[in-house]
Amino acid sequence: MPNDGTMVFAFIDSQNLNLGIQHAGWELDFAKFRRYLRDKHRVTKAYLFIGLVPGGESLYEYLQRSGFEVVFKPTTTYTAANGKATVKGNVDTDVVLYAAAKEIDKYDKAVIVSGDGDYLSLYEYLESKNKLGKILIPNKFRFSQLLTKYADYFDYVSVNRTKLEKDKK
């Protein structure tokens, strides 16, 4: 990663991160994750994109206290095939907008946190601008194969379970 003085911004798809870690069988401690981003990847600013759900205020406050710049998206609720009500906050376009346009002149390298293939064009663009720092894949065993051409940029959140897992109380 870059030397000191380099501005590194993280752009985090919170749903992809959360689901990836859940599929790995554990729960992420976001405060530990923010420190990990700072210490290992030298992230100076971390944008966390999340769906805004009534009743989630304490979570949102915790995320902000942990050092994230929280970007809220409206959510929709739909009934899944199994009959269960599911809340969805689609953050992909906002991650791309912030990383490729709104913030691009403010950072030297971007760390993108997602294993979603929808970000392939963003990685191509950032690489062409020499701005792609790392791609943090939430779950080493669950990510889009479209991203394999960027494997040199990969780091895996799930392999850091001992450092990043929420304490069980």
Image (tube, helix red, strand yellow):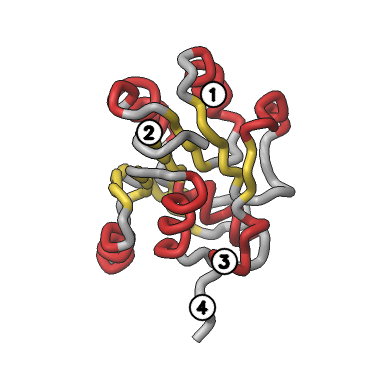
For label 1, count other residues whose C-alpha is less than 10 Å away and answer few (under 14), some (14-19) or many (20+).
many
Q: Is residue 9 visible?
A: no
Looking at this view, name the residue that lies furthest to the front: 4
Left or right of 73, for residue 125: right
Q: Could you tell me residue 63's position as x and y percent?
A: 33, 60
Which amino acid type corresponds to the residue marked 2 in the rendered image? Thr
User: Residue at position x 52%, y 37% from top?
Assistant: 1
Counting residues from the start of the chain, the first of labels 1 and 3 encountered is: 1
Residue pointed to by mark 2: 6
Q: Height in image: 112 above or below 68?
A: above
Q: Height in image: 74 above or below 63?
A: above
Counting residues from the start of the chain, the first of labels 3 and 2 encountered is: 2
Q: Could you tell me residue 61's position as x and y percent?
A: 25, 63
For label 4, count other residues whose C-alpha is less than 10 Å away and answer few (under 14), some (14-19) or many (20+).
few
Residue pointed to by mark 3: 163
Which amino acid type corresponds to the residue marked 3 in the rendered image? Lys
Which element carries disc 2, helix, strand or loop?
A: loop
Asked whether the beta carbons under mark 2 and mark 1 sit within 8 Å of each other, the answer is no
For label 3, count other residues whose C-alpha is less than 10 Å away and answer few (under 14), some (14-19) or many (20+).
some
Q: Which mark is residue 144?
A: none
Q: Which mark is residue 167?
A: 4
Which amino acid type corresponds to the residue marked 1 in the rendered image? Tyr
Real-space Cα distance between discs 4 and 1? Answer: 34 Å
Residue pointed to by mark 1: 123
Real-space Cα distance between discs 2 and 1? Answer: 19 Å
User: Residue at position x 53%, y 19% from top?
Assistant: 127
* Front residue of this view, candidates 139 and 9: 9
Asked whether the beta carbons under mark 4 and mark 2 sit within 8 Å of each other, the answer is no
Q: Could you tell me residue 26's position as x and y percent?
A: 61, 68
Which amino acid type corresponds to the residue marked 4 in the rendered image? Asp
Which element carries disc 3, helix, strand or loop?
A: helix
Counting residues from the start of the chain, the first of labels 4 and 2 encountered is: 2
